[in-house]
Image: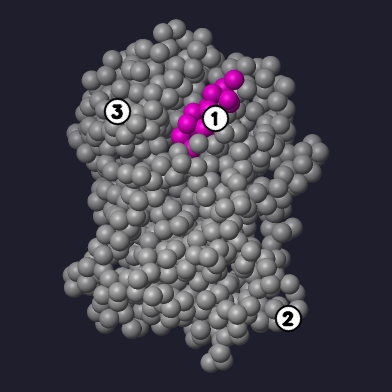
């Protein structure tokens, strides 16, 4: 899907990081054997094939040894890198994820440049249509004139509801969103999800808070919408834009918070088709769902019922001209990246510079790569995997995953806070677990998608419609568990509790996360901890609500929940205390799942590393023990610098803590204290009673 909106494969997915792209779209929601021995290719590599980074897989030159590891482990591991590395002009943040993303995008460009020369290549045709800037410039905003005319022709609230349903097909989400997802209590049943939506700013807090930067962002949003109206020849743009932002402010007031929306139980609400008319009157649900192709079912999941009900009332009470302006503005905004330069620059000036602090848009070829990757990712992915993901890398990653799973199983057998009966079910869930590594076993078919070399906006619309129809085609059929929610080129990973799986695309299985020729300690501290992170999501405060089949059900005892919550409450308070920007703290409740996953991932990965040594001592390399190198591997993958606007947006919206604070999770782990021996007066030092020991 190439629109700026994000619809997920499943109702609940926990991604590793929002490191490369902006924070997720509003309210977007993964046989155990004995420990496997060391990865042979890794052990041999230290004396044979050279790691890509440093002498053993870690960038020692990026350290700042003037900082005591107990005062700031992030600065100790990454301080010099932070001082000497500038954020590129086309980035809102920069670090290990971005470095790999640059590599992935560059490799994909080579694939698309070659495909563009093939007259029969669809990915080549799509890339060509984006790169032909002269043709796009000549068309101005002609490609969206028919969309504008259709919105202007709306004559009633029923027509408006129908227009909102049609807009969904092109990635434009109105005050209410609907899409095909999975049923959390019936994991093999695709169903229809309905949720709150419709904010042009990143989060409800951007409408409700009075901090000076937030107020400035609201004003900039009004200016941006005014500019869009001006570019399309619409009169009285400033007044109309202000009215739209005021309307969205009323939407924001009724929206659930992100903390509320991450609760899998509270967001699971079954409605019949008749319930919409009864519970949320004032909105023509038949017209809306019918236009979207979602009116033929009698089983819907409503994520935030009170917000959906209140949104229907807001639409009923709002004047039709205002509602039409709202839809018009969002339609132009969604189309802007695919139109002439004036639209592209206006869109980037607001979304890139104002909201994220990025001074310069990415080169056109990079944006073209992103377009094709999002529209036809698995077609590109086949070529990418064949060229850049050798079988030996996949085999090494598979073996490491088995080590991590085995270590998790050993942990589950001994958890003091988990009742024996619950531990037994937890181990059964782990035994039923599915890891997906590298790329899909089954590739998606894009033969039904029409692509023209001279019609960029038409290609985008057809791609969105194609993807929408793909979702509709799932209804009434068993879910296809072979599907992936990411392409092989993405620098990310995710846990999908509804299918009891973790997914690691090929592109993240590279240094600094994973290098078959690096010291195993660094690999376990890097990709090993990341694998453990995703694996543990299935047992965190939300993932633990899903059983071994992926069904949302309560399989913990009340005593388990009480003991578990007592521990996680401590972690919430720990992260609430962090203040990355003056007056802005990490939201401990919002980031709880990810912080817990970091804690568990490191714990399990260290166990797996120790088991891989088969009772032998780890070698000392460059004066560092194995455990010291393990934690440096963790710190290295999280090195990252942010622009202030981007960090502010993340603190308001991102379920992941900033990279510095993610690295600091080590202060809870006794093996880190054993490895680095911080003094009790060190800034990061926690007494044993203060440390959060969940796993």
Q: Main secondary structure of the magenta part?
A: helix
> Residue drawn at (58%, 26%), measured in percent from left and top?
344
Location of residue 57 with respect to 224 vertically, above or below: below
Residue range in magenta is 342-356
In this image, 320 relative to 150: left or right? Answer: left
Badge 3 is on which residue? Answer: 249
In the figure, residue 545 lies in which quadrant? bottom left
Alpha carbon separation for disc pair 1 and 2: 48 Å
Q: Residue at x 68, y 68 (%)?
A: 54
The correct choice, above or below, for 50 with respect to 264 in the image is: below
Q: How is the image coloured?
A: one colour
Q: CA distance from mark 1 to mark 3?
A: 23 Å
Secondary structure under tag 2 reads loop
For disc 2, the neighbor class at 10 Å (few under 14, some 14 to 19, many from 20) is few
The one nearer the camera, 503 or 204, is: 204
Quarter of the C terminus within the rendering: bottom left
Instruction: Classify residue 466 by image quadrant.
Output: top right
> Where is residue 160 drawn, in percent x and y?
36, 20
Q: Does the stretch in magenta take in 346?
A: yes
Q: Which residue is mark 2?
A: 47
- Helix, strand or loop under label 1: helix
Q: Position of residue 46 (x, y in %)?
A: 70, 78
Evaluate if marks 1 and 3 touch, with contact meaning CB atoms under 8 Å apart.
no
* Numbered mark located on residue 348 in the image: 1
Is residue 173 covered in magenta?
Answer: no
Q: Earlier in the sequence, mark 1 or mark 2?
A: 2
Residue displayed at 38% across by 75% down: 679
Residue 552 visible (yes or no): no
């Amino acid at each position: 899907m190439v629109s700026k909106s994000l619809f997920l494969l499943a109702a609940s997915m926990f991604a590793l990081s929002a490191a490369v792209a902006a924070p997720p779209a509003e309210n977007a929601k993964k046989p155990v054997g004995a420990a496997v021995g060391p990865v042979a290719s890794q052990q041999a590599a230290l004396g044979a094939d050279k790691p890509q980074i440093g002498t053993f897989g870690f960038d020692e030159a990026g350290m700042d040894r003037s900082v005591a590891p107990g005062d700031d482990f992030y600065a100790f591991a990454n301080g010099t890198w932070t001082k000497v590395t500038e954020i590129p002009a086309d980035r809102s943040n920069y670090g290990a994820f971005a470095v790999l993303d640059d590599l992935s995008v560059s490799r994909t460009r080579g694939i698309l440049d070659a495909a563009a020369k093939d007259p029969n290549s669809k990915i080549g045709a799509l890339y060509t249509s984006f790169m032909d800037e002269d043709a796009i410039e000549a068309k101005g905003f002609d490609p969206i004139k028919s969309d504008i005319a259709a919105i202007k022709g709306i004559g009633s609230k029923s027509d408006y509801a129908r227009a909102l349903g049609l807009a969904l097909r092109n990635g434009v989400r109105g005050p209410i969103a609907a899409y095909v997802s999975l049923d959390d209590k019936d994991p093999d049943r695709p169903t229809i999800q309905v949720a709150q939506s419709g904010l042009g700013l990143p989060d409800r807090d951007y409408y409700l808070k009075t901090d000076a930067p937030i107020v400035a962002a609201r004003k900039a949003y009004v200016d941006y919408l005014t500019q869009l109206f001006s570019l399309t020849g619409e009169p009285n743009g400033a007044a109309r834009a202000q009215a739209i932002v005021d309307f969205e402010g009323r939407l924001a007031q009724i929206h659930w918070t992100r903390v509320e929306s991450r609760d899998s139980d509270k967001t699971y609400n079954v409605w019949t088709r008749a319930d919409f008319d009864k519970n949320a009157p004032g909105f023509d649900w038949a017209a809306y769902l019918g236009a979207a192709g979602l009116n033929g079912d009698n089983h819907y999941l409503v994520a935030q019922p009170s917000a959906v009900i209140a949104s229907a009332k807001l639409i009923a009470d709002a004047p039709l001209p205002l509602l039409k302006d709202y839809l018009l503005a969002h339609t132009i905004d969604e189309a802007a990246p695919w139109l002439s330069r004036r639209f592209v620059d206006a869109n980037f000036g607001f979304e890139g510079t104002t909201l994220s602090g990025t001074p310069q848009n990415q080169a056109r070829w990079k944006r073209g790569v992103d377009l094709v990757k999002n529209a036809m990712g698995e077609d590109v992915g086949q070529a990418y995997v064949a060229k850049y993901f050798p079988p030996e890398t996949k085999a090494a990653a598979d073996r490491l995953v088995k080590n991590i799973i085995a270590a998790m199983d050993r942990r589950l057998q001994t958890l003091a806070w988990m009742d024996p009966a619950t531990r037994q079910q937890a181990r059964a869930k782990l035994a039923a677990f599915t890891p997906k590594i590298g790329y899909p076993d089954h590739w998606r078919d894009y033969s039904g998608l029409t692509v023209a070399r001279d019609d960029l906006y038409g290609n985008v619309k057809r791609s969105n419609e194609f993807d929408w129809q793909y979702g509709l085609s799932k209804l009434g059929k068993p879910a296809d568990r072979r599907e992936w929610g990411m392409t092989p080129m993405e620098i990310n990973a995710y846990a999908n509790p509804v299918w009891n799986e973790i997914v690691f695309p090929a592109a993240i299985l590279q240094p600094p996360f994973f290098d078959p020729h690096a010291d195993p300690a660094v690999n376990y501290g890097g990709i090993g901890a990341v694998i453990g992170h995703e694996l543990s999501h299935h047992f965190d405060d939300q993932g633990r609500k899903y059983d071994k089949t992926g069904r949302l059900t309560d399989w913990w005892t009340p005593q388990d929940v009480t003991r578990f919550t007592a521990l996680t409450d401590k972690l919430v308070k720990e992260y609430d205390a962090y203040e990355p920007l003056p007056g802005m703290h990490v939201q401990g409740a919002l980031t709880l799942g990810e912080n817990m996953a970091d804690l568990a991932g490191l714990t399990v990965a260290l166990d797996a590393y120790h088991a891989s040594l088969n009772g032998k001592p780890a070698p000392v390399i460059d004066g560092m023990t194995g455990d010291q190198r393990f934690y440096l591997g963790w710190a290295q993958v999280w090195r990252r610098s942010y622009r202030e606007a981007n960090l502010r947006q993340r603190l308001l919206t991102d379920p992941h803590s900033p990279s510095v604070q993610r690295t600091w999770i080590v202060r809870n782990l006794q093996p880190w204290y054993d490895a680095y021996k911080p003094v009790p007066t060190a800034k990061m030092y926690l007494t044993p009673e203060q440390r959060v020991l969940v796993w």
